[in-house]
Amino acid sequence: MREIVNPRNLAAVGRPGLLVGYLLAGYPDRERFLETAAECERAGLDILEVGFPAADPSSDGEVIQRAHTLADHSICCDLGYWRALRGAVECPIWVMGYRDDLLPSGVCRAMAEADLADAFVIPDMTPEERYSLAGELAPLGTDVLGFTNPEMSARELEDCFDRFSLIYQQLYAGRTGMPVLAEDFDGPLSRAHTHPHVRAFAGFGISTPQRVAELLSAGFDGAIVGTALMKKLNESPEALYAFVKELKAAARAGGIRCGISQPSTSAPRR
């Protein structure tokens, strides 16, 4: 079992009803992204999932793909910029990116060594690669999320839950931003609940406060909202901040109804 090693993550998962929000680094530009991230935290985000600008964001939907083409890619390996982000927010920073953008350049390890990322969310790695990376980054105090989706076998789910504590449970297999057409998360979520160390976060296709409340009431520890936030940002910053407040109110209500227990917050650090 890979325990949570990052203190910010440990503090966050000690609270019920977590709202995780995705924003793309460097979008709409260098300075406005930092302002947007800080305002979203003030509006209620518990965890900031930061998209790492990608050369080929093929697993993302149209809204996020377009944002990648417009983002300032010069920030990717600029550790000074990521330090500015660390200074702008107090919540955990989960860097979401693709393997080829994060690993070959060494920026993934550099960010971990500099305490600029609390966790990495890398969907296009094999389970073995992801577990190996988790072992590499754990001594640096950085977590790596495991992934599950409805198409995984019972054995694959158990392997993931055995190896990881933070789980990104994709509500469907495919690109981000698509509507969820079937409610088939109960089986994987029930299995997750048999592992006391696991904290399961629902992601993909979550676009309304009602959906956030439903998922947290069902037993998820948190909900990850991406495309819907980016759409609101494209409308206006004010629309985004108001939406985050609505989502957080729903997350808080859903978490309270579920009665999520408080996990232990003891784990090694650096």
Image (cartoon, rainbow, N blue to C red):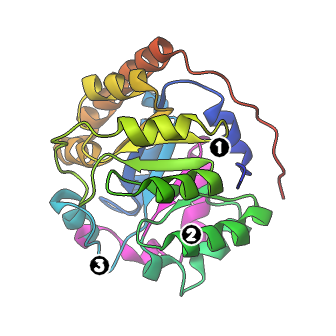
Q: How far apart, in angstroms, are the residues tagged by discs 3 and 2?
A: 20 Å
Q: Which residue is drawn at the image coordinates 46% and 72% (left, top)?
A: 75
Amino acid at the residue labelled 3: Asp
Residue 234 as seen in the image, left or right of residue 218: left
Reading the image, the residue beneath label 3 is: 56
- Estimate the x, y position of residue 52 in percent, counting from the top left: 43, 67
First in sequence: mark 3 vs mark 2? 3
Reading the image, the residue beneath label 1 is: 9
- Estimate the x, y position of residue 265 in percent, counting from the top left: 76, 35
Amino acid at the residue labelled 2: Arg
In the picture, the quarter occupied by the N terminus is: bottom right
Q: Which of marks 3 and 2 is in front?
A: 2
- Estimate the x, y position of residue 156 in percent, counting from the top left: 48, 59
Q: Nearer the viewer, mark 2 or mark 1?
A: 2
- Whether 84 is among the magenta residues is yes
**Mark 1 nearby-residue class (10 Å; few <14, some 14–19, many ≥20):** many
Question: Which span is picked out in magenta?
Answer: 69-97
Q: Which residue is drawn at the image coordinates 65% and 75% (left, top)?
A: 109
Asked if labels 2 and 3 touch by Cβ distance under 8 angstroms, the answer is: no
Q: Which residue is drawn at the image coordinates 32% and 56% (left, top)?
A: 151
- Estimate the x, y position of residue 179 in percent, counting from the top left: 16, 44
| Element assignment for label 2 | helix
Residue 216 visible in the snapshot: yes
Residue 129 as seen in the image, left or right of residue 180: right
First in sequence: mark 1 vs mark 3? 1
Please tell me whether residue 166 is drawn above or below residue 46 in the rendered image.
below
Which of these two is toward me, 161 or 71?
Answer: 161
Please tell me whether residue 4 is drawn above or below residue 159 in the rendered image.
above
Asked if labels 3 and 1 touch by Cβ distance under 8 angstroms, the answer is: no
| Element assignment for label 1 | helix
Reading the image, the residue beneath label 2 is: 130
